[in-house]
Amino acid sequence: MSKKYNNSITLFGNSDTRKKQVFAIKTNGTAANDPKKTEGAPVFEIYKALANEKSTKKLQESLESGEMGWAQAKQELLFLLGSLIGPYCKKYEHFINHPEEVNELLLQGASRARPIAKATMRDVHSAIGRLELEREIRNKTL
């Protein structure tokens, strides 16, 4: 899947969009009650990458035995995606709707990082001899 080919799945954002994207994944057109080849099938491979071993094995058996069709497998994938990223989507939506909180968090992080960065740069300048050079230049100009 590639965003370039417009066949990616949007993780954050509208769940309706994600549903359309999952249901747009190409399958081989095997009838719902016919056995399906799971190896290399995009729906199954995405599911396998995200689910635990037990769930993956169950989906694989259901597809390969013909108990489940690709539409049901896509529904399972959609459910799995929702359960994995649902809480993060809510947080994403919150921050999209409250950019001032993002700015405040960034400012807080910068104020915590600044003293650490200054100390690190002081050590770097000392290690390369820059502090001594600055002192020499200051002494010669005074």
Image (cartoon, helix red, strand yellow):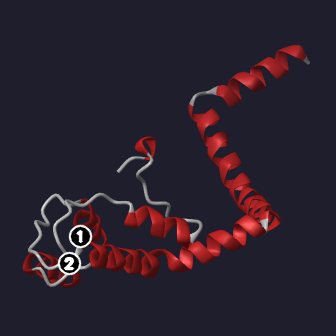
Disc 2: which residue: 56
Which kind of residue does numbered mark 1 sit on?
Lys
> Could you say which is closer to the camera, residue 105 or residue 133?
105
Which kind of residue does numbered mark 2 sit on?
Thr
> Could you say which is closer to the camera, residue 82 or residue 21?
21
Disc 1: which residue: 48
Relative placement, left or right, of 17 versus 95 is left
Relative placement, left or right, of 37 versus 107 is left
Q: How many marks?
A: 2
Relative to 33, is 18 above or below?
A: above
| Residue drawn at 27 percent across, 76 percent down | 73
Which quadrant holds residue 49?
bottom left
Relative to 128, is 116 above or below?
A: below
**N-terminal-most mark, 2 or 1:** 1
> Could you say which is closer to the camera, residue 125 or residue 5?
5
| Mark 1 element type | helix
Where does residue 117 sit, x and y in percent of width and height? Answer: 66, 48
Which quadrant holds residue 27?
bottom left
Relative to 57, is 111 above or below?
A: above
Residue furthest to the top: 140
Where does residue 139 sit, x and y in percent of width and height? Answer: 83, 21
Q: Which mark is residue 90?
A: none
Relative placement, left or right, of 60 versus 103 is left
Where does residue 131 sit, x and y in percent of width and height? Answer: 70, 30
| Residue drawn at 10 percent across, 66 percent down | 37
Mark 2 burial class by Cα count in 10 Å: few <14, some 14-19, many 20+: some
Where does residue 76 sit, x and y in percent of width and height? Answer: 33, 79
Relative placement, left or right, of 41 versus 64 is right
| Mark 2 element type | helix
CA separation in Å, label 2 and label 1: 5 Å
| Marks 2 & 1, CB-CB < 8 Å contact | yes
Mark 1 burial class by Cα count in 10 Å: few <14, some 14-19, many 20+: some
